[in-house]
Image (spheres, rainbow, N blue to C red):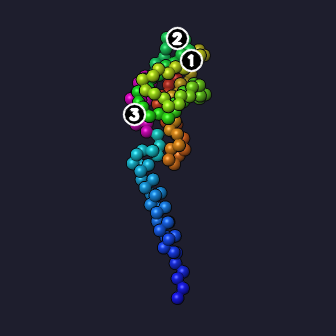
Amino acid sequence: MKNDGVSSAIGTIILVALTVVLVAIISAVIMGMTGCNTSGSIDNTISDKIIVYQSNIPGEFNFILTKNGYDMIIAYVDSYPVKIIYAAKPKVLYSLTNISSGNHNISIVVVVLDSLFYGNLECPLYTDELTF
């Protein structure tokens, strides 16, 4: 009699691989790694993650992070990246300088590097249109 089924070794490998994939998906959902967590308030002056203020020096904008664990922060002025901060630290003053006078859209985003399924994610911390 000839057995035409899948061998037990291949079947075991397939079941283990399927289990690993399911565990990864479930843990990603539970730990909130599947998207940006923007549940904190993002208003124009303060949130639970960032404190921002416009300096009294013309063309300067300052911000202080209040949380740990950011891989990278990118500051945009009118959709152009003007400052990239790797391994950003909390309670450190960061400044954007030499901003030309006029109205500008300022955005500070967190980049989550190598997220499980989505690659790099940009999650907004702050956005506003300011006059310099």
Q: CA distance from mark 2 to mark 3?
A: 29 Å
Assign a secondary structure to mark 1.
Answer: loop
Answer whether labels 1 and 3 touch (C-beta < 8 Å): no
Name the residue tied to disc 1: 97
Assign a secondary structure to mark 3.
Answer: loop
Q: Which residues are magenta?
A: 37-49
Q: CA distance from mark 2 to mark 1?
A: 9 Å
Mark nearest the camera among 2 and 3 is 2
79 or 57, nearer to the observer: 57
Question: How packed is label 2: few (under 14 Cα within 10 Å), some, or many (20 or more)?
Answer: few
Percent coordinates x, y for residue 13 in the rendering: 49, 66
Assign the magenta stretch its main secondary structure. Answer: loop
First in sequence: mark 1 vs mark 3: 3
Question: How packed is label 3: few (under 14 Cα within 10 Å), some, or many (20 or more)?
Answer: few
Q: Which mark is residue 10?
A: none
What amino acid is at disc 1?
A: Thr
Q: Kindly tell me whether residue 100 is visible in this rendering.
A: yes
Q: Which mark is residue 57?
A: 2
Percent coordinates x, y for residue 75 in the rendering: 54, 27
Q: Residue at x 51, y 28 (%)?
A: 108
Percent coordinates x, y for residue 60 in the rendering: 53, 16
Q: Residue at x 44, y 60 (%)?
A: 19
What amino acid is at disc 3?
A: Gly
31 or 38, nearer to the observer: 31
* Quadrant of the snapshot with the C terminus: top right
Residue 19 falls within the magenta-colored stretch: no
Q: Residue at x 56, y 28 (%)?
A: 84
Above-or-below relation of 35 to 66: below
Q: Which mark is residue 40?
A: 3
